[in-house]
Amino acid sequence: MHVFVTGGTGLVGSAVVAELLGNGHTVLGLARSDTSAQALVTAGATALRGGLADLDVLRDGAGRADGVVHLAFGNDFSSAEALARTVAEESAAIAAIGETLTGSDRPFVVVAGTPAVPGRLALEFDPQPTDGPVGGRGIAVAGALALAGRGVRSAAVRLPRTVHHHGDGGFAGMLTHIARRSGVSGYPGDGTQRWPAVHARDAAVLFRLALESAAPGTAWHAVADEGDTVRAIAEVIGRRLGLPVQSVPVETYGPLGAIFATDQPASSAHTRDALGWKPVHPNLLEDLELLS
């Protein structure tokens, strides 16, 4: 299969590109810079220059492909307004790709996040949240899944709060970066809230499986660790960096503060049973031991 991939040079995207290429697929990757383009070519893919805001480029890439994996998302979390702009940009990109694939019966795998369900583990059948700081992403993903009724084999792979590799990535990576900058390994609230996690290489396998065989309109959970407490995560970071560990104000985490403070464990039991996905790489707390 010739696959168009957005976000193919990020932590998750580079793992997905390698996974696809290693399993007989070819890849056309969206590249917003010369550096990204070179990284894709070095990995064995072909680069298509453009960014998420370049809707005609996205339509061109999707039109050339046998399937699409969407992973790109901006990294500006500096303010609520910046985050809203990033969400709006992604929403328009998903809609443009979906329009191109309509009626083709080709697969369209979009990235999403595991939801938070009060009092229990989140399941694959739980709806994507459509309110809060990133609620717009839930609306966009729901729109993509609805394309199943318009001749698109759409599916969503829901990533947990931390997708990690060599101790970096996701919410835990943000805790690490803030700890290095502030001199304190902090956590919001009492730290008992739980975050699910997965190694980037394990997540990449699930994206491939969803691309190859997921039924239209389905959602899947790339969850290896159902939920580590944020305090436990901060304690490993503090020990590895030689920093004190303590609770810090939710405002430390800007527009993501409310999400950081939420208990949000998740299950992947259905995903494992239905798609045969089996995580094999180190869990989050093990991976964080690589920090120095």
Image (cartoon, rainbow, N blue to C red):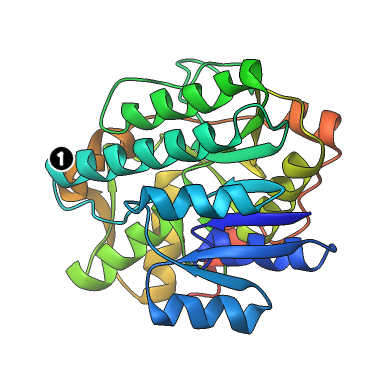
Of residue 196 and residue 99, the one placed in the foreground of this image is 99
Residue 92 appears left or right of 61 = left
Instruction: Please say whether residue 87 is visible from this viewpoint.
Output: yes
- Give the position of the C terminus as an image quadrant: bottom left
Give above or below for 35 relative to 26: below
Give above or below for 31 relative to 190: below
- Location of residue 212 in the rendering, given as x and y in whole percent from the top left corner: 80, 43
Name the residue at 21% across, 42% down: 85
Q: Amino acid at mark 1?
A: Ala
* Mark 1 neighbour density, 10 Å: few (under 14) some (14–19) many (20 or more): some
Of residue 282 and residue 58, the one placed in the foreground of this image is 58
Name the residue at 32% across, 40% down: 260
- Location of residue 144 in the rendering, given as x and y in whole percent from the top left corner: 53, 28
- Location of residue 11 in the rendering, given as x and y in whole percent from the top left corner: 52, 64
Location of residue 124 by image quarter: top right
Q: Residue beneath label 1, please?
A: 80
Name the residue at 28% across, 37% down: 88
